């Protein structure tokens, strides 16, 4: 076989190594690199991104958080094809959480060293704004040291429709009631053609980004996500990353990027499963492309503990949460579990320092 030398590829690789911003077309070229080479470039970008963190120890530090994912209701009226969690109000196993059950879950979380509650739910058509404000006020009053990381952008778009109020007022009122930050759920792929196929009744791309823009302007940080490996193309993934990067340039409110692969079991959306190599390749590309994101989180929840660990060499600097409770991905057939000891072992086996963090990536130990 004759190999033709391409000097432009060398120039692109040097560009990535030096930390310069890459274009969408360049990202597509990078995606075709051998996996190990792409991983090395992503690890280099991780080092550059973390170099200034934690008094010069950022390159050696890998973080995790102890929190719990509480789904306040499974009633939802958007019927996403990729979701096995939602129920209608008529289903026997539909629910809205009680304050007693909520308190029990938070107390269990605190006992395990938890500092945060990830609060998300379905798009319930009948819960009122006052119900949510009372819930937030109850949590803040009873557990003031626990950060409420709650309500994805698609939920806020739903609230806008149900409450008949602008996003600015809703988010400001939720913040005043105790909301501390916003998760990036519901991002899926920020390309409307894709969203119209997998979740046509859910917030579209501009809606999702608008919620994040408003939240950042009101002083609430958020994460950003991408669920891939279903009906999207590689170009769609890059467009998704581009939209996140543009938003981060504008508002600087994203704390981290988390990507994970579609889990198909018990869902109406059928697609060939994306394996570990595809996951690592996409995460590595995201780290390179999202040059303005301080952190990238590994998705051991969908990939398992071993690949979650390997992902720390493919651009990630965080292992995410121990996930005391997780109900959505597990309904689609993925049930990996992790303890704090597991987290620390996986991190330290690679020669890194393991540290628990808060939502803003401040070190707690």
Image (cartoon, rainbow, N blue to C red):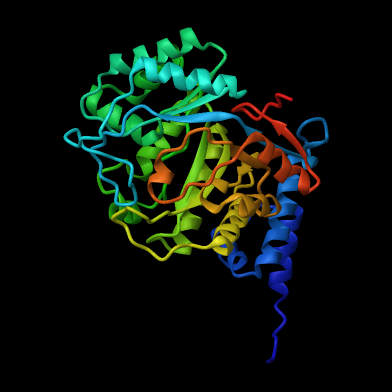
Q: Is residue 149 left or right of residue 163?
A: right
Extreme residue toward the top, this view: 141
In depth, the one of 241 and 279 nearer the eye is 279
Q: Is residue 187 above or below residue 144?
A: below
* Location of residue 114 by image quarter: top right
Where the C terminus falls, by quadrant? top right
- Kindly identify the residue that appears in the image at 66 percent across and 70 percent down: 34
Q: Is residue 143 left or right of residue 165?
A: right
In depth, the one of 65 and 204 nearer the eye is 65
Extreme residue toward the right, this view: 56
Extreme residue toward the left, this view: 90
* Location of residue 64 by image quarter: top right
- Kindly identify the residue that appears in the image at 64 percent across and 69 percent down: 33
Q: Is any part of residue 250 visible from this angle? A: yes
In depth, the one of 24 and 3 nearer the eye is 3
The image shows a total of numbered marks equal to 0
Q: Is residue 106 above or below residue 8?
A: above
């Amino acid at each position: 076989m004759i190999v033709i030398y391409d000097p432009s590829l060398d120039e692109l690789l040097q560009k990535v190594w030096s930390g310069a911003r890459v274009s969408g077309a360049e990202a597509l070229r990078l995606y075709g690199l051998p996996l190990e080479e792409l991983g090395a470039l992503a690890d280099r970008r991780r080092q550059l991104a973390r170099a200034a963190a934690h008094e010069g120890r950022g390159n050696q530090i890998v973080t995790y958080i102890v929190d719990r994912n509480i789904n306040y209701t499974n009633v939802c009226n958007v019927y996403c094809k990729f979701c096995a969690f939602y129920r209608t109000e008529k289903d026997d196993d539909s629910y809205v959480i009680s304050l007693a059950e909520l308190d029990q879950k938070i107390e269990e979380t605190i006992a395990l060293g938890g500092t945060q509650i990830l609060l998300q739910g379905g798009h319930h058509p009948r819960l009122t704004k006052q119900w949510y404000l009372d819930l937030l006020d109850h949590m803040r009053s009873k557990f003031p040291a626990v950060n409420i990381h709650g309500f994805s952008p698609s939920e806020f778009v739903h609230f806008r429709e149900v409450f008949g109020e602008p996003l600015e007022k809703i988010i400001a009122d939720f913040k005043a009631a105790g909301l501390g930050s916003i998760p990036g759920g519901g991002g899926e792929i920020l390309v409307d053609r894709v969203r119209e196929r997998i979740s046509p009744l859910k917030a579209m791309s501009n809606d999702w980004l608008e919620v994040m823009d408003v939240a950042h302007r009101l002083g609430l940080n958020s994460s950003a996500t991408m669920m891939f490996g279903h009906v999207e193309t590689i170009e769609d993934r890059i467009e998704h990353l581009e939209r996140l990067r543009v938003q981060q340039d504008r508002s600087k409110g994203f704390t981290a990027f988390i990507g994970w692969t579609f889990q198909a079991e018990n869902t109406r959306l059928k697609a060939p499963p994306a394996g570990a190599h595809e996951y690592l390749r996409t995460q590595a590309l995201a780290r390179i492309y999202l040059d303005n994101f301080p952190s990238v989180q590994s998705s051991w929840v969908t990939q398992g503990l071993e690949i979650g660990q390997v992902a720390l060499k493919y651009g990630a600097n965080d292992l995410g949460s121990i996930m005391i409770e997780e109900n959505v991905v597990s309904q689609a057939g993925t049930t990996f579990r992790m303890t704090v000891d597991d987290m620390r072992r996986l991190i330290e086996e690679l020669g890194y320092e393991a540290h628990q963090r808060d939502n803003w990536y401040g070190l707690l130990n």
